[in-house]
């Protein structure tokens, strides 16, 4: 900042709490003031947040994404000269991954094995929906993965716009639509339709 703007601008840091430090000082893992600060300033630097695996509180990272609607996880992937690699031509690796951050399994809708909620959900699947392919319904944990038209479209829109703005040759939709026809398959269908509808001069799709 000093190099670019001299003395005319500077960064003023504001600490907001989350995770163990927030719990120790505020008695809550993610204070409302933290969400309000991100809403106000629109930018921040986040360090690692500890989340118990398989028990305890929900992932604070997932809660932050949902509360702030951070629906794109954008991950550039490329090789740096001198870094060891197990592949033959790491210099050919140059991609940007756009992952949906707020839907699907990141919704965090699930019930633990042996709980009344899991039993109620299993009963609903069997009695109301006619689902019979759960092999061990009484000892299973259950999760729901909602995938929406709107969520799929805005992710694909962001990826295509990025590719166009950065003169990239292609966008690849990664899905498991051969197994999950309506969620994963829906993502593929809605994504291709969005690309053809909103970017007809720049996009040619191959299903």
Image (tube, rainbow, N blue to C red):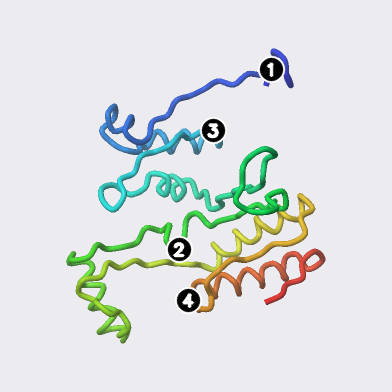
Q: Please tell me whether mark 2 sits on a helix, a strand or a loop.
A: helix
Q: Is residue 189 left or right of residue 47?
A: right
Q: What residue is at 39 percent from the left and 33 percent from the top?
A: 33
Graded by Cα atoms within 10 Å as few (under 14), some (14 to 19) or many (20 or more), the crowding at tag 2 reads: some
Graded by Cα atoms within 10 Å as few (under 14), some (14 to 19) or many (20 or more), the crowding at tag 1 reads: few
Relative to 63, is 9 above or below?
A: above
Where does residue 137 sit, x and y in percent of width and height? 24, 76
Q: Earlier in the sequence, mark 1 or mark 3?
A: 1
Between the residue at mark 2 and the residue at mark 4, the CA separation in whole angstroms equals 12 Å
Q: Please tell me whether mark 3 sits on a helix, a strand or a loop.
A: helix
Name the residue at the right extreme.
Answer: 201
The residue wearing badge 4 is: 180
Q: Earlier in the sequence, mark 2 or mark 4?
A: 2
The quadrant in which the C terminus is found is bottom right
Look at discs 2 and 4 and give the one toward the viewer: 4
Between the residue at mark 1 and the residue at mark 3, the CA separation in whole angstroms equals 20 Å
Q: Earlier in the sequence, mark 4 or mark 1?
A: 1
Q: Is residue 28 left or right of residue 181?
A: left
Q: Earlier in the sequence, mark 2 or mark 3?
A: 3
Label placed on residue 104: 2
Q: Please tell me whether mark 1 sits on a helix, a strand or a loop.
A: helix
Look at discs 1 and 3 and give the one toward the viewer: 1
Relative to 5, is 125 above or below?
A: below
Where does residue 97 sit, x and y in percent of width and height? 61, 54
Q: What residue is at 54 percent from the left and 33 percent from the top?
A: 41
Circle 2/circle 4 CB separation < 8 Å:
no
The residue wearing badge 3 is: 41
Circle 4/circle 1 CB separation < 8 Å:
no
Q: Is residue 82 left or right of residue 187?
A: right
Between the residue at mark 2 and the residue at mark 3, the CA separation in whole angstroms equals 28 Å
Give the image quarter of residue 145. Answer: bottom left
């Amino acid at each position: 900042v000093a190099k670019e703007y001299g003395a005319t601008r500077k960064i003023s840091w504001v600490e907001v709490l989350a995770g163990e430090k927030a719990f120790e000082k505020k008695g809550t893992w993610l204070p409302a003031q933290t969400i309000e600060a991100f809403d106000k300033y629109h930018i921040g630097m986040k360090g690692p947040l500890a989340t118990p695996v398989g028990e305890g509180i929900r992932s604070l990272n997932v809660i932050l994404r949902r509360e702030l609607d951070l629906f794109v996880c954008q991950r550039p992937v490329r090789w740096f000269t001198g870094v060891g690699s197990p592949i033959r031509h790491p210099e050919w690796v140059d991609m940007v991954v756009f992952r949906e951050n707020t839907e699907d399994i990141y919704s965090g809708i699930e019930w633990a094995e042996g709980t009344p909620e899991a039993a109620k959900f299993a009963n609903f699947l069997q009695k109301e929906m006619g689902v019979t392919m759960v092999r061990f319904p009484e000892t299973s944990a259950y999760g729901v993965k909602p995938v929406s038209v709107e969520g799929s479209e805005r992710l694909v829109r962001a990826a295509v716009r990025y590719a166009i703005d950065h003169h990239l040759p292609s966008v690849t939709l990664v899905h498991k639509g051969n197994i999950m026809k309506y969620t994963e398959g829906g993502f593929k269908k809605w994504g291709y339709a969005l690309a053809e509808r909103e970017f007809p001069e720049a996009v040619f799709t191959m299903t």
